[in-house]
Amino acid sequence: MERLQKVIAASGVTSRRKAEELIVNGKVRVNGIIIKELGTKVSSSDEIEVNGVLISKEEKEYYLLNKPRGVVTTTSDDKNRRTVIDLIDTDARIYPVGRLDYDTTGVLILTNDGEFANILMHPKNKVEKVYMAKLEGIITGEAINKLKDGVVIDGVKVIPSRVKLRKVDPSSNTCIVQIIIHEGKNHQVKKMFSEVGYSVEKLKRERVAFFTLDKLKSGEYRKLTTKEVAKVYSLAK
């Protein structure tokens, strides 16, 4: 017997937190009966419906993709652009964990395990996301200190865990800056640099938690190992 919200998350339908919201709002049925009590336990033989759709017990899959430029981080696109799902050869209903902009490259995890995804995305787990940003102009020490003190984007103050100037190219008036964040807000890194007066020319995510690109070329992917999946679950707080 397992908790209902855990079973829903494990099916890949949604995260555990969202599953809890659906239960409380009366959107979940077990064997035809609406369940609103969190912590209700179900067995493998129980039929579970979420928003009127019977969930299936799908085999869990986990992938690490080196996302290329010009690909959208969604499961589908109304403009018929290529999505990250198109790059993975699987019939499972996987989805990206978090988002990378259309022109941003690098580490992207995809899975159909809602609980796994939630661990990586939830701010309380403080999962590090490491980016390398190519900026127009040479960033000043004052701007770096402003970033370290925290900037307000979309009404919320965000503070990076690290900001470091990595390379300067006076001939092109550009520089490379490493920035490490814990959140995953929409366009967060670009907005943070914009707040201190710099525009991002290129952006690459080099690491999420302990996942790096290693030898993956742009557009290539690999399956995660059992040990890697277990290690992510150990990050939950």
Image (tube, rainbow, N blue to C red):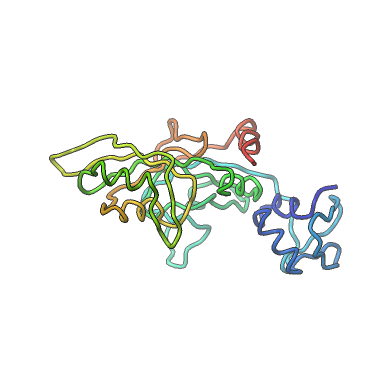
Query: Among all residues in the image, which is located at the extreme left?
Result: 171
Is 229 left, or right, of 79 in this rendering? right
Name the residue: 80% across, 65% down. Answer: 36
Name the residue: 84% across, 50% down. Answer: 44
Q: Is residue 44 above or below residue 237?
A: below
Is 204 left, or right, of 24 in this rendering? left
Q: Is residue 186 above or below residue 63?
A: below
Count of numbered tags: 0
Residue 183 locus on image (x, y percent) = 49, 49
Front residue of 10 and 154:
154
Residue 233 locus on image (x, y percent) = 65, 38
Residue 221 locus on image (x, y percent) = 49, 40
Front residue of 226 and 166:
166
Q: Quadrant of the C terminus?
A: top right
Name the residue: 86% across, 67% down. Answer: 33
Residue 229 locus on image (x, y percent) = 63, 36
> Where, by quadrant of the figure, is residue 170 drawn?
top left
Q: Is residue 224 above or below residue 46?
A: above
